[in-house]
Image: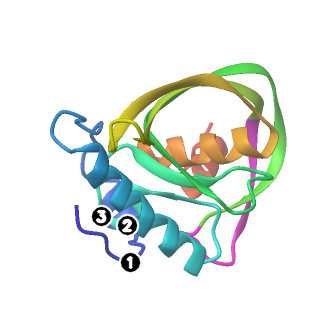
Amino acid sequence: MKLISIIDLEKCGLINPIYEVDMLEISPEEMYNESIKMAEFCVEKKGIGLSAVQVGVPEKFFVYTKHGSGGEFFLVINPIYYPKGSRYQVDEACLSYPGKVYRMKRFRSIRVDYWTVEYNKEMKEYMYKQVLGIMKGDDALTFQHEVDHGNGKTIAMSIRERRNR
């Protein structure tokens, strides 16, 4: 995987199919190293999340910083979420559309299922780890936003879909 700058998603990144990460094909250490590059890029652009799709990698993974984590980034691989409760309207921005803010409907709470990479000190190696849990508030919002990218959607596309209904 070679990272590039943020691409025009509607012209190239979202036309191609987007694949799940094959965790048998790419080592946990390689995934971790890619996530570090993405997190650095995200910090440089003053973002809180960045999907691989946004930098030209057609795979379902992203990095984001959890609310209250002090800026620490987390890697999310092959994410799925299930809505819990009601939706609410929220103003949302995206690194793919600098300077623009969109009004979106998001779930306040979601149940999540994804993989991440952790360093095992005993074995002295990086390992994949499955994560199951509940996210609420800003973390749930960011998670839904980044999963949308991995599913081939941008917030601008979502707004157009709502207008066309």
C-alpha span from label 2 to label 3: 11 Å
Location of mark 3 (residue): 12
Q: Position of residue 136 (x, y in %)?
A: 78, 33
Classed neighbour count for the residue bearing mark 1: other residues with Cα under 10 Å, few (<14), some (14–19), many (≥20): few
Q: Report helix, strand or loop for mark 3.
A: helix
User: Is 68 left, or right, of 33 in this rendering?
Assistant: right
Q: Position of residue 65 (x, y in %)?
A: 65, 55
Location of mark 2 (residue): 55
Location of mark 1 (residue): 5
Q: Check if residue 46 falls in the magenta segment.
A: no
First in sequence: mark 1 or mark 2? 1
C-alpha span from label 3 to label 1: 13 Å
x 43%, y 30%: residue: 129
Under mark 1, the amino acid is Ser
Tag 1 and tag 2, C-beta contact below 8 Å: yes
Q: Check if residue 96 falls in the magenta segment.
A: yes
Mark drawn on residue 88: none
Image quarter where the C terminus lies is: top right
